[in-house]
């Protein structure tokens, strides 16, 4: 039997998946453009430009000798630290191989081909992917000013339908737009949505928010048993390469998600590093400060170049450059990697992650040159 016949047996919802498009790896661009890796500036995946806390790195070294052993499948130490930090019980926590993993666990535990999930236009690409992989129907609600529109999301929830909505995905702040639903508007959305729909509140960038704009999402868990809050160590904590994130929810929902979880989904290095990273508040604060300064540097640069951008609450910003594909080609030729977001329906925008001062400067200079080239 030919291999193609086997693939024909994959369900149509699997065959129809358009793969996630990651940022271009530095090594790949170096090969393509014959550049040195050290000369390339990558601001494409919202990674932490300061790297990881030295304490997290030391924790990884301590685990190296244990590499032949399976990690703790229950993640006891990490869960205990998270329970302490957030004031929740350990049975309310689901650990993931990145928070991407917990988004998938939610989809796999609660979605079927007879159900649907709602998410916003321009919302994080993993929501439609996870929905489709579960065979469920994805419903996109229109955005307002590139941000989540609570009214539109509520209206999109399928109630009396063949495919009732089971999950509403909310990214706050959202990637790739950087838009934020302020705490009162977000709370209003949770209060008004049906209790039989799970709200997956993805807070991958919450650390970057000033106190006044941060929702008491974890406190809301007491009021909303249908709430799932997801967090990650990939962004502000600088552990993207290790893959570790988590969900906080009711013990009942956590139990369901844990049933579809691989027994050893979070590796030993990730568990140890996450605990250490959480303790290094000084490093975290330094990262947030660098981000604030870098964001100001970038947006000042955009204004000088006469470019519009979407005000962002994350560690990245979407700027409007016109022919983004052409600008991106020029940036790549100059050794600068950012993220085109045409796949999000934003062909005139590029998303750039906030880097160190020198990286931002290289990017802005390359951008200016790209804009000039395009004029010629
Ligand atoms: C980066 C990101 C994540 C998660 O990334 P992980 O590395 O899988 O933890 C989740 N949601 C959004 C909106 C993101 O931008």
Image (spheres, helix red, strand yellow):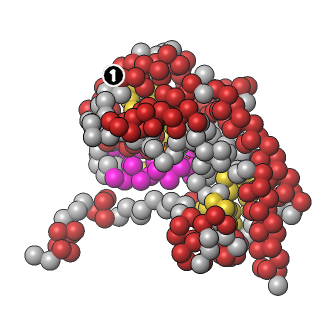
Query: Looking at the image, which residue sits at the far bottom?
Result: 376
Q: Nearer the viewer, residue 132 or 313?
A: 313
Q: Residue at x 71, y 35 (%)?
A: 286
237 lies left or right of 179:
left
The residue lying toward the viewer, choosing from 279 and 259, is: 279
Q: Position of residue 368 (x, y in %)?
A: 82, 69
Q: Is residue 79 left or right of residue 311?
A: left
Residue 124 inside the magenta-drawn segment: yes
Say which residue appears at 53% left-offset and 67% top-offset.
Answer: 27
| Residue 221 against residue 273 in the figure, above or below | above
- Please tell me how crowded label 1 is: few (under 14), some (14-19), or many (20+) other residues with Cα within 10 Å: few
Q: Residue at x 31, y 59 (%)?
A: 13
Q: Nearer the viewer, residue 339 or 277?
A: 277
Left or right placement of residue 297 versus residue 198 in this view:
right
Magenta range is 115-133
Check disc 1 and report its element: helix, strand or loop.
helix
Q: Quadrant of residue 238?
A: top right
Quarter assignment of residue 94: top left
x and y percent of residue 99 in the render? 46, 40
The percent position of residue 371, horizontal first and vertical second, equals 80, 73
Quadrant of the frame with the C terminus: bottom right
Picture quadrant of residue 293: top right
Please name the residue that numbered disc 1 is placed on.
252
């Amino acid at each position: 039997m030919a291999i193609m016949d086997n693939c024909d047996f994959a369900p149509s919802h699997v065959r129809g998946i358009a793969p996630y498009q990651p940022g271009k790896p530095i090594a790949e661009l170096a090969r393509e453009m014959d550049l040195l890796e050290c000369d390339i500036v990558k601001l494409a995946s919202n990674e932490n430009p300061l790297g990881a806390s030295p304490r997290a790195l030391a924790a990884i070294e301590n685990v190296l000798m244990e590499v032949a052993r399976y990690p703790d499948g229950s993640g006891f130490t990490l869960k205990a630290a998270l329970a302490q930090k957030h004031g929740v019980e350990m049975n309310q926590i689901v650990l993931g191989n990145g928070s991407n993993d917990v988004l998938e666990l939610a989809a796999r535990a609660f979605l079927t081909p007879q159900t649907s999930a709602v998410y916003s236009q321009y919302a994080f690409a993993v929501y439609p992917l996870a929905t489709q992989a579960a065979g469920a129907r994805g419903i996109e609600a229109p955005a307002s000013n590139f941000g989540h529109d609570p009214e539109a999301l509520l209206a999109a929830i399928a109630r009396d339908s063949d495919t009732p909505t089971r999950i509403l995905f909310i990214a706050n702040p959202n990637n790739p737009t950087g838009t934020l639903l302020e705490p009162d508007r977000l709370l209003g959305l949770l209060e008004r949505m049906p209790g039989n729909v799970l709200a997956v509140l993805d807070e991958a960038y919450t650390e970057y928010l000033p106190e006044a704009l941060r929702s008491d999402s974890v406190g809301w868990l007491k009021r909303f048993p249908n709430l799932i809050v997801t967090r990650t160590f990939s962004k502000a904590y600088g552990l993207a390469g290790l893959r570790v994130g988590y969900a906080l929810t009711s013990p009942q929902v956590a139990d369901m998600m844990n049933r579809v979880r691989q027994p050893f989904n979070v590796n030993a290095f990730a568990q140890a590093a996450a605990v250490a990273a959480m303790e290094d508040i000084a490093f975290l604060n330094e990262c947030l400060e660098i981000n604030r300064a870098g964001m100001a540097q970038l947006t000042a640069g955009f204004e000088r170049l006469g470019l519009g951008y979407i005000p962002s609450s994350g560690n990245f910003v979407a700027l409007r450059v016109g022919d983004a594909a052409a600008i991106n080609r020029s940036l790549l030729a100059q050794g600068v990697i950012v993220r085109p977001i045409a796949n999000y329906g934003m062909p005139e925008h590029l998303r750039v992650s906030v880097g160190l001062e020198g990286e931002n400067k290289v990017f802005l200079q390359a951008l200016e040159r790209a804009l000039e080239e395009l004029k010629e």
